[in-house]
Amino acid sequence: MTSHRAIRIALLALALGGPLLAPGPALGGPRYRLKLAHVIGAGTPIDVAAHRFADLVRQRTGGEVEISVFPAARLGGERAIIEGVQLGAIEMSFTTTGAMGAFAPEFHVLDLPYLFPSYEAAYTYLDGENGTKLLGLLDRRGIHGLVYLENGWRNFTSSRNPLKRPEDLKGQKIRVMESPVYMGLIRTLRATPTPMAYSELPRALLQKVIDGQENPAVNIYSARMFESQPFMIQDQHTYNVFVFKVNGKTWKALPESIQKVIEETAVEVRDFQRKLNREADGEFIRKLQAKGMHVHVPTAAEMKAWQAATAPVYEEARRFLGGAWVADTVQFRKDWEAGKYGAEEQRYVERFRSIAVPLDDVMRNFR
């Protein structure tokens, strides 16, 4: 971390009051005041989940814990937010795997293309032994990992031409997250990867600094990328997550009773947000089409072509992720396809069937 960035984050923390892990005001104020930051727009499923988490924790701790939510990169881009969590200037955050790799490169295994064939496959991997092992790696960085929330299926968009086959991206400059896997993915498609912070993306598209990008539909719509990106392919090349984490010292300073409330509420809100996000995905696709975006749904043959074109990324990833991480993840996919996780798949189907989400309320934010 540069000293300039560290000083900026520390000053920001002071301006916001800094973390408070001591008894609050005598007249019944909260005992613990925490900040929760993310870069996605207000009113989106992930932001709704952040506020739901804050409200439930406040209720379940009898007002002892007050969590303030800062959306839309108000506390900086993802890299700065994670550094803030490391320093304790920001107590909690949701960030994607792109920026996480600078702190635990093993997280980039989740960026491998066409890894998960379904939502349930992704949930089984993330909530099971493999995902838990990844979260545990954050301890060495002074961060405590809680759960994985959903960013969603990432899809390519372009300002230059319709996207149907892998060769349609050839020669284009494509914005990607700060991930060697995503950069390798773009190179295998004979395009030029351009790492860039999410907060800078909409302007870069409007100014034609880049030709295209890849994101879930909710982000494409909420950031109004349809204004500059008339073409999209719903190829779902990666299932992307938000990693929910808390500063390690902050976590250890909390009483066990409050830790338990936070852990249990995080799991509950994780499932709520996943259900909300996956239901919203189709709605945002329809909204993009209504704005004039041409959304191509690839045929089975076209999908095989995209998968074949990006297969070399797996071998490249072995060199910087370590062969074991890639091998274990590929083995999970094989076991899933062989039916080994059928019981887990059914449990997720049944669990999500019983969760009610305010889809209409969320979509009203984007009329």
Image (spheres, rainbow, N blue to C red):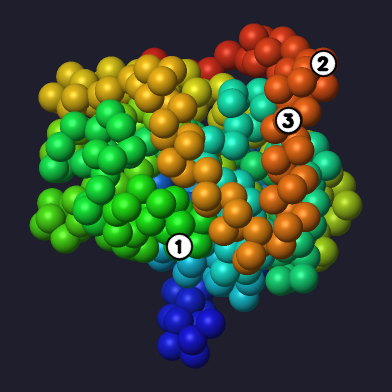
Mark 3–mark 2 Cα distance, whole angstroms, equals: 16 Å
Amino acid marked by disc 1: Glu
Instruction: Compare marks 3 and 2 and give the one earlier in the sequence.
Output: 3
The residue depicted at 25 percent of the width and 24 percent of the height is 295
Above or below, comparing residue 88 to residue 341 in the picture: below
Along the line of sight, which residue is nearer the eye, 297 or 246? 297
- In what element is the residue under mark 1? loop
- In what element is the residue under mark 3? helix
- In what element is the residue under mark 2? helix
Q: Residues within 10 Å of mark 2 (few under 14, many from 20)?
A: few
Q: Report the residue marked by disc 1.
A: 178
On the image, the x and y values in percent for residue 331 come to 76, 38
Look at the numbered discs 3 and 1 and tell me whether their residues touch, using CB distance below 8 Å.
Answer: no
In which quarter of the view is residue 154 placed?
Answer: top left
**Residue 343, which numbered label?**
2
115 relative position to 158: left or right:
right
Instruction: Compare marks 3 and 1 and give the one earlier in the sequence.
Output: 1
Amino acid marked by disc 3: Lys
